[in-house]
Image (cartoon, rainbow, N blue to C red):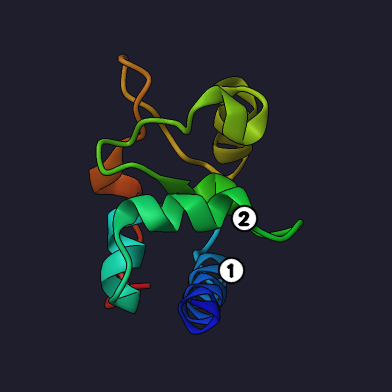
Amino acid sequence: MAEKKKDFQDKYQEVYVIVSNIPSGKVATYGQIAMMIGGLTARQVGYAMRTAPAGLPAHRVVNSLGKLSPEYVFGSQELQKMALEKEGITFTAAGNIQMKKHLWKLSSD
């Protein structure tokens, strides 16, 4: 059992490395990060983000529809939105991130 916990801790560290490399003005999805690492689900990436170290640009990780994180993640969706807008992220009239414009693609960034 301790070995499985160690595996997840190692995977979480991989999540944090990827998140630390998301450039300003771009976002990545939980599923995108899970696919980059392999062996994790989008939900598990979300769990990793709950225990993310301070200073990590966690506000740049969103769901595949461009919706902001639940209130409990940043204290409020408005705080996450303000941080993203400060980086030039734009939103639709419905309040979702314009994913076609801002999704991080490794091949072009």
* Disc 2 and disc 1 in contact, CB within 8 angstroms: yes
Establish if 107 lies above or below 82: below
Viewer-proximal residue, 56 or 23? 56
The residue sitting at the front extreme is 1
Please state if 61 lies on the left or on the right of 76 as rendered.
left
Residue at 60% from the left image edge and 28% from the top image edge: 72
Counting other residues with Cα less than 10 Å from the Cα at mark 1, is it few (<14), some (14-19), or many (20 or more)?
Answer: some
Element assignment for label 1: helix
Give the residue pinned by disc 1.
20
Please state if 5 lies on the left or on the right of 64 as rendered.
right
- Name the amino acid type tagged 2: Pro
Q: Is residue 84 visible?
A: yes
Please state if 40 lies on the left or on the right of 85 as rendered.
left
Could you say where residue 89 lies in the image, as x and y percent from the top left? 47, 40
Q: Which image quadrant: the C terminus?
A: bottom left
- Name the amino acid type tagged 1: Ser
Element assignment for label 2: loop
